Amino acid sequence: MITSGQQLFINSTIPVLRRDERIIGVALGGSYITRDKMDEYSGLDFTIVVEDDKYEEVLRERVEIAEKFGTLLASFTGEHIHQPELLICMYDEPLLHVDLNFVRTDMLTYRFDNPIVMHQRGTVLSDAIARYPYQKSATDMQWYEDRFWIWVHFIATRIARGELFDSIESLSFLRLNVLGPLILIKNGFPPRGVRHIEDCPTDAKSLTETIAEYDRASCLRALKAAANLYISLRGVNKAGLFTRDLAESRALRYLNSLEAKLKL
C-alpha cells in the first residue's frame, strides 16, 4: 500500500519532469507496479526517458534536476551495478530512497519489468515498452557453470587457511551472484541477487544452510550446502548445458578431504 509520503513525492515530481521539454516520458517501476508489494519501506523507481539529442546534456544536469523534486540529502551514480545512467538518491521529508534512471527509448530494451507510464509525449513511451519485451530472466547458465566450481575450491582454500572473514564474505558472494538468482529464476522472478528471496519460502530455507558462523567447521558445512544447492538448482536449467563434471568432482572431493584433514 503506497504511503501518503510516497504519493506526495510522486505528485511533486511528475509536474517538474513534464515541464522539461527534453523529457519525453516518465514511468514508475519496482514495487509500484504491484501495489500490494509496496509498504512504508519501499523506494520509488523512476524511468525518465530523454530525447536522444538531449541525453548527454540531461545526464550532466541530473543532480540539479533531482534537487527540484524535494530535499535531496545525497546521491550517487550506479557504476557499481553497471548502470552509470542511474542516479540513486536519498530524500528527506519524507526520508525516502529514490532511483532515477535516465534513458533513451532504445535503452528500454534492457529492463526486468513493465513500468507504469505516468507521462509521455504522444505514445512514445508506451510504444517503446510494447516494442521491447522485458527480460524475464537474462541468465546464461553456462556462465554460472564455468565459474562455480572454481569459486568453491577457492573458498575452500580460504577456510583451510583459517581466513574466516574472507570465507564468510565469499559465501555471501555465492548467495548474491549465483544461488539467489537461480532460486528467483526457478520461481519465475527476475534474477536480482537475493531481493525478495523470502517470496520463495522453501528455497529460502535451503539458502539459510549456506550461512556460516565465525567457525571453520561452520564455514565448511555452509560451503558444502552451497554446492549441493547449486547442483539442485542447476538441474532445473540443465538443458543444453556443458557441465564441468571433472571440476565438480575434484572440488567436492577436496571439500571432503579438508573435512577429514582438519578433523571437522
Image (cartoon, rainbow, N blue to C red):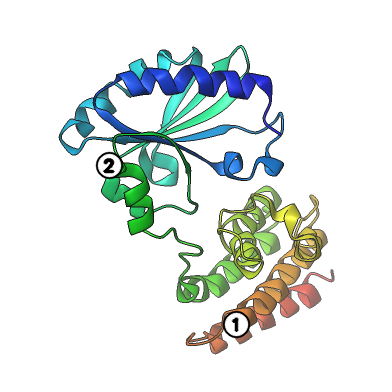
Query: Residue at position x 55%, y 71% from top?
Result: 148
* First-in-chain label (1 vs 2): 2
Image location of residue 220, percent across then percent down: 75, 65
The residue depicted at 69 percent of the width and 31 percent of the height is: 41
Q: Give how far across and how far down residue 122 sits, in percent.
A: 29, 38
Of discs 1 and 2, which sits in the foreground?
Answer: 2
Q: Quadrant of residue 223?
A: bottom right
Residue 194 versus residue 69 in the image, above or below: below
The x and y percentages for residue 139 are: 48, 67
Q: Position of residue 234 (x, y in %)?
A: 61, 78
Image position of 203 with respect to 149: above or below: above
Residue sitting at the far front:
122
Position of 186 relative to 189 (above/below): below
Image-based side of 13 in relation to 8, left or right: left
Task: Check disc 1 and report the residue beneath it.
Answer: 248
Figure quadrant of residue 221 = bottom right
Q: In the image shown, does 172 or 182 lie closer to the viewer?
A: 182
For the residues labelled 1 and 2, the Cα–Cα distance comes to 43 Å
* Residues tagged 1 and 2 counted as in contact (Cβ below 8 A): no
**Which of 127/257 is in front?**
127
Give the number of the disc on residue 104: 2
Q: Is residue 211 left or right of residue 249?
A: right
Q: Quadrant where the N terminus lies?
A: top right
Q: Secondary structure at mark 1?
A: helix
Q: Amino acid at mark 1?
A: Glu
- Residue sitting at the far left: 53
In the drawing, does residue 56 fall left or right of residue 48? Answer: left
Mark 2: few/some/many CA within 10 Å (<14, 14-19, 20+): many
Q: Nearer the viewer, residue 220 or 137?
A: 137
Instruction: Identify the residue at image location x=68%, y=83%.
Output: 253
Helix, strand or loop at disc 2? loop
Indicate the amino acid at tag 2: Arg
